[in-house]
Amino acid sequence: MNMLEGSIGDKIIKFVIPLALTGILQQLFNAADVMVIGQFAGKNAMAAVGSNAPVINIMICLFIGVSVGANVVIARYIGQNRAEKVKDSVHTSIVFAFFSGLFIAVVGQFVAYPILKAMSVPDEVLSMAVTYLRIYMGGMPVIFLYNFESAIFRSAGDTKTPLIALTISGIINVLLNLFFVIVMQMSVAGVAIATVTANFVSSLLLFIFLRRREGMLKVELGSLKINSDVLKSMLKIGLPAGVQSGVFSLSNLCIQSAINSLGADVMAASSAAFNIEIVIYYIVNAFGQAATTFVGQNYGAGNLKRCRKITRTALLQNIVFTVVASFAILFAGEFLLGLFNSDSAVIGLGLIRLKYILTGEALTSVMETVSGAMRGYGKSMVPAVTTFAGVCGIRIVWVYTVFKTIGSYESLMAVYPLSWAVTALALAVAYFLARPKEEVV
């Protein structure tokens, strides 16, 4: 895809659709874990899987953030037509992803129990939750590898290839879920093993595609090493982006602890609702990543006027797509929640969460698009700090003040749209202050 010339709106859509479908498909396969568990192993097992989501997201978001750094660096070098730098960046990304994942996999075996215990996971759920988390953590090398490989393809405008790999691995995931849980009676362990196996397949497929690819993105085994200068550039952009993504998970970890204190029904309902509402986030995030990649290439080519047009176009499209999809899912909320668990109490509580989350998703469109554009400019620290203060700060204070006083599930869910509104406004102001001026280039 030529991001440096020609029309913008249609190219953003072509970039976003496969990327959003990749995220949605990935979440549908993750939701299949919860569905199979909820229908065939009971709501305690379902709650055990759901209680792990914030912990897993913190680990993954941090390193996916670094993969955004890889995306920006590679896109910028493509815009500058520096083939050797692109090659160094590609190989550095793959090596860093694998060994970072290996480190997290080892550490995860030791921290799984104390983390979940600290989150107030109920005793009847705790042992299953620990089992799931340890197995999932063991698969981090291939999970990280898939995300970095996807970033490599995105940097050149290719969002279809990761979708193909994910589709194949996702089908394998669903089949293994059914086999391990229904046939082998392995409960949460079976679901975790199926997930890790599917991620291994997707990361292997993308590696094979990169090996066979021609041009600057081709992977050569003899070139698999870390270039320290390239890694520094990736970390400079990627770590703040990872912190920004991790902030959501960190604040959600605090909220999950509050949810856990409300009992297994609320835990199961929140888990089911999360697996539905997260679909919207992948649409929002896809436009944010489009802004990052398109701005990154054009900023590398020195075209600031086009960068600003890209940001405006991506923002408008993001808001429209997000609002339409959010209300469509909200309308079908009761049916969708019933796919996870038929318990009327669980469905009712799930609808409360969907109402608060989906009606405020347009605010996340502003947050992700503006943040994505700033990352494309290489200014990753600004959105990270703003998001940390706006999202994490407000949510943690809310949990220990308002929720502690009122104690209801609705009072807890109300913090989501509130934190988004404050942060979206702050990020919009930060964007206009921090974006490069015309005379800089």
Image (cartoon, rainbow, N blue to C red):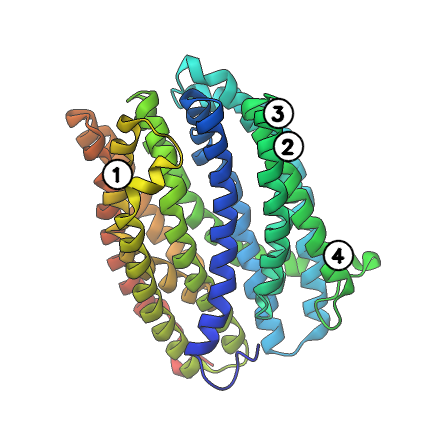
Q: Percent x, y for residue 384? A: 40, 52
The residue carrying mark 3 is 183
Q: Nearer the viewer, residue 395 or 181?
A: 181
Callout 2 environment at 10 Å: few (<14), some (14 to 19), or many (20+)?
A: many
At 34% from the left and 68% from the top, the residue drawn is 315
Identify the residue at the far left of this view. 406
Q: Nearer the viewer, mark 2 or mark 3?
A: 3
Is 265 drawn above or below residue 226 in the view shown? above
- Marks 1 and 3, Cα distance to the nearest angstrom? 32 Å
Q: Nearer the viewer, residue 410 or 59?
A: 410
- Marks 2 and 4, Cα distance to the nearest angstrom? 22 Å
Q: Percent x, y for residue 346? A: 30, 29
The residue carrying mark 2 is 138
The amino acid beneath tag 3 is Val
The amino acid beneath tag 4 is Ile
The residue carrying mark 4 is 208
Callout 3 environment at 10 Å: few (<14), some (14 to 19), or many (20+)?
A: few
Is 197 drawn above or below residue 106 in the view shown? below
> Which circle's residue, 4 or 3, is located before the other in the chain?
3
Callout 1 environment at 10 Å: few (<14), some (14 to 19), or many (20+)?
A: many
